[in-house]
Amino acid sequence: MYIFVMRHGEAEPSLQNDQLRPLNDYGISQAQKSGDWLTLFAKDSKISLSHAMVSPFLRAQQTFQQVNLATKIADIRSNSDLVPSGNCQALHYSIDHFAQEHQNVTGLLLVSHMPFVSYLVDEMCEIEEMRMFSTGTIVCIDYNVEESKGHIVKTFTPE
């Protein structure tokens, strides 16, 4: 299974409620470019992108909406573990459980935030890189469900 870990597009400056920060115009453009890249990569790699888990925060939801204009993912789930302060071990366990229940899934998109996306990639690949994600960046992980571990295959950052 391929897991695509994505940071949301660029958002407006902080408001009183971080959960309600919308994407700015550049962030919308980043999300669209990332969606186009993701669609092409999935097609070339013969991966069916059928499922997504998205942070409930507005900027992540808006990012997914723009990405999904290209990807047309049918099964979308809001996941409160994907928030900036989420528990990456809990999400890793959830993904393993999800993959065991949905063995036909070959591509799963996760849309979240820094620093969570960095911690999650480290957790799922058993590395300690603390990778920096620019807004709109996608890291593709080739994930082995039986081993509960993956490795990074490709990274895309929109210009």
Image (cartoon, rainbow, N blue to C red):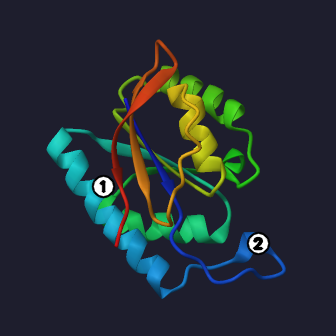
Residue 81 falls in image quadrant: top right
**Residue located 62% across and 58% down the image:** 113
Residue located 32% across and 70% down the image: 33
Q: Which residue is mark 1?
A: 38
**Camera-side residue of 104 and 87:** 87
Give the mark nearest the N terminus, 2 or 1.
Answer: 2
| Residue 115 image offset from top left, x and y in percent | 66, 53
Relative to 109, say whether 126 is above or below.
Answer: above
State the mark number for residue 18: 2
Gap between marks 2 and 1 measured at Cα: 27 Å
Q: Which residue is at the front of the view, 70 or 6?
A: 6
Q: How many marks?
A: 2
Residue for point 54% across, 38% down: 121
Asked whether the beta carbons under mark 2 and mark 1 sit within 8 Å of each other, the answer is: no
Left or right of residue 76, residue 46 in this image: left
Q: Which mark is residue 58?
A: none
Residue 153's quadrant in the figure? top left
Q: Amino acid at mark 2?
A: Asp
Q: Position of residue 152 (x, y in %)?
A: 39, 35
| Secondary structure beneath label 2 | helix
> Which residue corresponds to the image point at 44% horizontal and 59% vertical from the top-left?
137
| Residue 48, picture quadrant | top left
Q: With respect to residue 149, does 118 lie above or below? A: below
Question: Which percent across, then down, holds residue 56?
Answer: 67, 60
**In the rendered view, does 24 fall on the left or right side of 39?**
right
Q: Amino acid at mark 1?
A: Leu
Residue that lies at the very extreme toward the bottom in this rendered image: 25
Q: Label 2 crowding class (10 Å Cα cut-off): few <14, some 14-19, many 20+?
A: few
Q: Dot 1: what SS?
A: helix
Give the position of the N terminus as an image quadrant: top left
